[in-house]
């Protein structure tokens, strides 16, 4: 009688940034595997998990397809099945497709605990003022610095420069009537918050004042 085959041991973590993810990622049930010919084994859940762990940032399906000589549709199907498996089994992480690729994120139900255990030990990446400004740009884009300042009630010049330097917002043109620079969020912003399109943002916009209602502020000098 042939001995049953056993899966190879897990690969050790790749580094500090991936330690938590490596510890959490385990085997996925065989039902997650996608059968494609040729080379169906190349799209095994274990391989996809390994790619997701070592990838710096999001993992584009097209990159995987090109490297493994597989159709993009097949890679997307395999990654979707993996994401559904994580959701169904209640894992501590989720797999989401963003504007630039697929990425692992902590499960939302553990955000409070992660805040206490992990995030409180690190300096804040963005100040409350920067987060507030980023939200205004996200919901009112394309928008000028003067319009952002009108909504927030304070000058936004310094914060806007910080957000631009971090790749979260960018210049996208000028306002026809005033010539002021207009800003919008970037694909990097979508990747960082785990969204594929801007229309996936929560419906917060109705609670922000209309740009027209604060146009008079735009003619004032910066504070």
Image (tube, grey):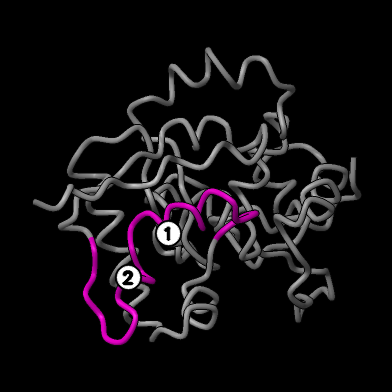
Measured along the vertical axis of the image, is residue 63 above or below residue 163? below
Q: Residues within 10 Å of mark 1 (few under 14, many from 20)?
A: few
Give residue 75's quadrant in the image.
bottom left
Measured along the vertical axis of the image, is residue 175 above or below residue 51? below
Rendered-image quadrant of the C terminus? top right
Where does the image place residue 215, in percent across and percent down from the top left? Answer: 68, 59
Secondary element at tag 1: helix
Measured along the vertical axis of the image, is residue 96 above or below residue 75? above
Where does the image place residue 99, in percent across and percent down from the top left? Answer: 51, 67
Foreground residue among 192 and 221: 192
Measured along the vertical axis of the image, is residue 173 above or below residue 136? below
In the rendered image, the residue lying farthest to the front is: 1
Where does the image place residue 146, in percent across and percent down from the top left? Answer: 78, 55
Q: Are marks 2 and 1 in contact (CB under 8 Å)?
A: no
Mark 2 vs mark 1, CA separation in Å: 9 Å
Indicate left or right for 160 with 23 as reference: right
Q: Which residue is pictured at 42% across the width and 59% down the height?
A: 47
Mark number displayed over residue 41? 2
Give residue 42's quadrant in the image.
bottom left
Magenta region, residue range:
33-58
Q: Is residue 34 rendered magenta in the image? A: yes
Q: Residues within 10 Å of mark 2 (few under 14, many from 20)?
A: some
Q: Which residue is pictured at 83% across the width and 57% down the height?
A: 219
Q: Which residue is pictured at 52% across the width and 70% down the height?
A: 60
Secondary element at tag 2: helix
* Residue carrying label 1: 47
């Amino acid at each position: 009688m042939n001995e049953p085959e056993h899966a190879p041991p897990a690969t050790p973590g790749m580094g500090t940034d991936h330690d938590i993810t490596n510890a959490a990622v385990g085997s996925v049930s065989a039902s997650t595997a996608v059968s494609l010919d040729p080379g169906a084994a190349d799209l095994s859940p274990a391989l996809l998990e390994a790619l997701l762990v070592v990838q710096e940032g999001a993992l584009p399906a097209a990159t995987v397809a090109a490297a493994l000589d597989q159709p993009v549709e097949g890679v997307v199907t395999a990654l979707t099945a993996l994401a559904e498996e994580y959701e169904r089994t209640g894992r501590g992480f989720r797999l989401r497709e963003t504007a630039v690729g697929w990425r692992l994120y902590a499960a939302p139900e553990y955000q409070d605990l992660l805040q206490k255990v992990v995030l409180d030990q690190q300096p804040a990446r963005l100040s409350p003022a920067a987060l507030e400004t980023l939200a205004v740009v996200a919901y009112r884009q394309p928008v000028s610095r003067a319009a952002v300042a009108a909504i927030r009630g304070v000058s936004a010049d310094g914060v806007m420069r910080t957000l631009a330097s971090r790749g979260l917002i960018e210049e996208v043109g000028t306002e026809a009537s005033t010539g002021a620079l207009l800003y919008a969020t970037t694909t990097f912003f979508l990747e960082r918050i785990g969204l594929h399109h801007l229309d996936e943002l929560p419906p917060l916009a109705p609670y922000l004042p209309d740009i027209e209602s604060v146009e008079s502020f735009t003619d004032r000098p910066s504070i």
